[in-house]
Amino acid sequence: MSYTQSMYEEDWFMRQIKMMTAAIARIAFGKDIALYELQDEAGQTETDTLHLYLLRLLDDGKAGEAEDLLFQSLNPANYDTLLLALDFYQRLNALPNDELEHMNFSRQEILDGLQEVQSVYGLDVLI
């Protein structure tokens, strides 16, 4: 695969991920971007604590471990975890290719993860 073709493919994946997260955010939350924000630093919720831990794992280059933990924590009755998942995948998608490669993670895995999140929350119509 040529360098140009590889760059085009990566750009395609990035656009698909952005469009998918925006569509889910619009449907579930009525907004175009899914940004998880801590509810109250003094009285952190369980989801807040998970969010901070996921960020720490990403900072440590452990995207796969973070994704596994995220999926163990998803709760279709709790849309805070959906928002957290969308935020997580947006953050991964924003990383440069070399950083993703260093974490042994790909844009295809980001897209696959988003599709699985959709399924967990019954949003399969977006696939």
Image (cartoon, grey):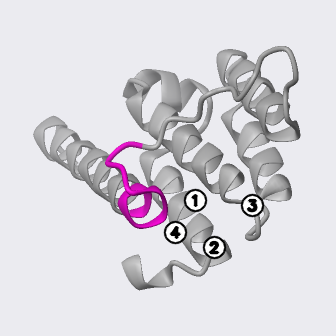
Magenta residues: mostly which secondary structure?
Answer: helix
**Most foreground residue, 91 or 110:** 91
Viewer-proximal residue among 40 and 24: 40
SS assignment at label 4:
helix
Q: Residue 95: in sight, yes or no?
A: yes
Amino acid type assigned to the residue bearing label 3 in the image = Asn
Identify the residue position indicated by label 2 in the image.
121
**Label 3 neighbour load within 10 Å: few <14, some 14-19, many 20+:** few
Residue 113, numbered circle: 1
Q: Is residue 118 above or below residue 93?
A: below
**CA–CA distance between discs 3 and 2?**
9 Å
CB of mark 3 within 8 Å of CB of mark 4? Answer: no
- Mark 4 — residue? 115
Mark 4 or mark 2, which has the lower sequence index? 4
- Reading the image, the residue beneath label 3 is 78
Tell me the SS state at disc 3.
Answer: loop
- Amino acid type of the residue that numbered disc 1 sits on in the rendered structure: Gly
Distance, label 4 to label 2, CA atoms, is 10 Å
Q: At x 76% / y 69%, what residue is drawn?
A: 77
